[in-house]
Amino acid sequence: MAKKLVFPSDFYFGTATASYQIEGGWNEDGKGLSIWDTFSHTCGKIRDGSTGDVACDHYHLWEQDVALMKDIGCNAYRFSISWPRVLPQGKGRFNPLGMEFYDRLVDALLKAGITPFITLYHWDLPQALQDEGGWAVRDTAYYFAEYASIVVHKLGDRVKHWITHNEPWVVAWIGYGWGEHAPGLKNERVAVQVAHHLLLSHGLAVEVIRDICPDGEVGITLNLSPVHPASDTENDKIAAVRHDGFLNRWFLDPIFRGHYPPDIMELSPIFLPEVQPGDMAIISRRVDFLGVNYYTRSIMKFNASAKPLQVEGVAPEGAEFTEMGWEIYPPGLYEILMRVQKDYNPPKLYITENGAAFADEISPDGGVHDPKRVDYLKKHFAQAHRAIEDGARLAGYFIWSLMDNFEWAHGFTKRFGIVYTDYATQRRILKDSALWFKKVIAEKAVEID
């Protein structure tokens, strides 16, 4: 017999996007180059050879996209600002035409009854700043605070929910440590320093945002996963603790406790960033919420030759996986929400991203039927509801993503949207998952079997 899980009356049901993945308009109206413009134009970096030059053309079709969200019933929308659209060189000259785009978007969202949640940095650093060293250079943290000040001064009269960074772990390690994302560097020592500068810039921006928009709330979004040992052996348990320190605690501990995890710092000189006096006090400034991006869990085993952590990921046998090769593991969402609430006690939690990529196609009837995504979302919403019942201060849930888009190094080969994007025509089609979400929002409840 079906059961309805009812969410709080003031719960935010939304979708999430990122500027480079949807906007296009890569060189219009005075926008400067970002590191993703450069990276995607570099031969061999993107799986299908595509770029985000046009992406979903949201820069021109934003009114249509707001209307889609209104039709679905979303009462919140998380999107990011393109730093080089506002400050083409990352600092100095302000580009009013770039800001006007976001100004119009915010007004349209509010008119549609959709609360804007703005992410200030979702990976598209101005190329001009990268040319000076990017996040490996401490000055970039201060330029970020100046950029935050400009944006919040312009939009803070209407926007009250601010996210400083999206997934600094990904920026540091996949961008600077392993070279799979922009700017494509491969230096793990630099990655650790990048992580520190990202956290420093977060703390600096928190103060700026709170000063300019005292009636708003500010936080950060982290990609978090529960980490399980591959077996009951002592070595595998050690591997799980280490990976948790590397992935989760390396960012949670400084933000909420004012220090990096000692057990990780002791492993290798790599994990000893240059920290100046006062940095940790800035990084650990009070936040109003934590954004959690959850997609899957991590299963780790010990591997002595895998320096510096001596850990290796394991794929569980017999599990279901998304097109990204990620295990579908809904209980992990509950686990990570409860762990963060218990260990770090943030005032509020948002699920700022959760979703799945599947090989969606337009059916002969003109619809896009994605039962696997519906099932995925249903089971994850059930775990979110369970977390609320058990004391997690969860206030909203943003599905990744509003629409199929440019999936970073995967280009257009992975579809995460609840809205189908026909890239050749830019036609949008509500998938069955969007229709399911529409019903969930209308009823403020998820029906489970």
Image: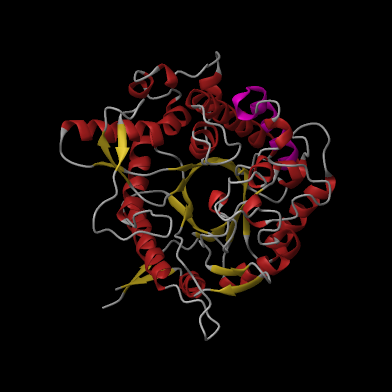
Q: Residue at x 55, y 20 (%)?
A: 279
- Residue 213 is situated, as x and y percent measured from the top left of the image, at 67, 40
Report the magenta residues as a range. 134-152
Q: In the image, is residue 347 above or below residue 75?
A: above
- Residue 267 is situated, as x and y percent measured from the top left of the image, at 34, 20
- Residue 127 is situated, as x and y percent measured from the top left of the image, at 71, 36
The answer to which quarter of the image holds residue 65 is bottom right
Quadrant, the C terminus: bottom left
Which of 116/360 is in front? 360
The answer to which quarter of the image holds residue 240 is top left
Q: Residue at x 51, y 27 (%)?
A: 187
Q: Is residue 208 left or right of residue 245?
A: right
Q: Main secondary structure of the magenta part?
A: helix
* Residue 29 magenta: no
Which of 107/49 is in front? 49
Q: Residue at x 37, y 51 (%)?
A: 296
Residue found at the far top of this picture: 277
Tell me if residue 395 can be seen.
yes
